[in-house]
Image: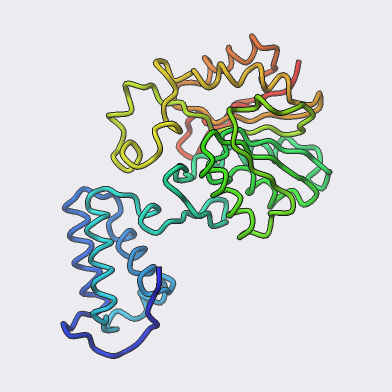
Amino acid sequence: MSVAPMTSLAPAHEMTVADALAGAIRALAAAGIDAPRREARLLLSAVLGVDAAVILGNPERLLLAAEQTPFAALVARRATHEPAARLLGRREFWSLEFALSPETMVPRPDSETVIDAVLANLAARDASLRLLDLGTGSGCLLLALLSELPAATGVGIDIAPNAALTARRNAMALGLADRADFVAGAWAAALAGGFDVIVANPPYIESRAIAGLPPEVGQHDPRRALDGGPDGLAAYRALAPEIGRLLRKTGVAALELGAGQAQPVAALMRRAGLVVVEFRRDLAGLERCLVLRLG
């Protein structure tokens, strides 16, 4: 998005930052958008190309017509429950910025539990580790880990070619392209073993439950990344034997879980010969990540 510089010139229809924010907050609140004040600031920050702190510090700054128009358009789209991350084409994860595409899910804070789990179960962060991210999407899990593991390299797999392309571009933007490779494929079918770390955020929503998801998710995230089959466990059944085949004896795997799936997924993994190390809870206290090793 092209943005205009901060200026004090008055637009044709005079409107201050405070006026614009107040109107946006009212519109978003009426549409049932959570945290409308934060969302309005985020959208105006993007239009003006400044941090939210600058906006808060300049409430009387007048907006140009060329700034009012794109801001109003973004607010109108957000009021239909199109996610802000989709509107802006990017989302922060693990303090890194990730570009999005229609084929990638919006990274969520809950998924940072997977990063925490892996880092907590590694003996040394400076080792020459080999990482695998199954269903990589934007590449957020793999690239966040590589940012913490300076000697590691990794591979991200996604069945959607455009998702793999988006992840590759994110790696380049983050300066990690020389340590990350992204390819299109069905899980790990074409890979040989020998990975020290395997991570995955597979589709885990029951098919019939997708229609009841918040529209920000159900209508805007790719269904392929959400639909876990009739019981939500189809992807875990496919992954269990692959993890056992690909993980090194000393390696660790970390899988994101849906609410209430900890024990069913653990049972699937145990039947595949894997050992459950721990369940990691997210900030809401839900068992969000399953950590595994070989038996």
Q: Where is residue 104 drawn, in percent x and y?
A: 47, 43
Q: Is residue 295 left or right of residue 84?
A: right
**Image quadrant in which you'd find residue 97:** bottom right
Query: Given the current orientation, which residue lies at the most extreme right position?
Result: 127
Which image quadrant: the N terminus?
Answer: bottom left
Q: How many marks?
A: 0
Q: Nearer the viewer, residue 190 or 239?
A: 190
Please give left or right for residue 113 compared with residue 219 in the image: right
Q: Quadrant of residue 211?
A: top left
Q: Position of residue 108 (x, y in %)?
A: 47, 44
Above or below, 134 against 144 in this view is: above
Residue at left offset 45%, top offset 49%: 101
Residue 253 lies, in percent from the top left, at 68, 29
Front one among 276 and 175: 175
The residue that appears at 64% across and 9% down in the rendered structure is 271
By what rule are the colours in the image chosen? rainbow
On the picture, is 225 further left or further right than 12?
right
At horizontal 59% and vertical 37% (from top left) the residue drawn is 184
The quadrant in which the C terminus is found is top right
Which residue is painted at 56% across and 36% down in the image?
Answer: 158
Picture coordinates of residue 57 (x, y %)?
A: 37, 79
Rendered view: 44 above or below 277: below
Q: Which residue in the rendered view is the most extreme toward the bottom?
A: 9
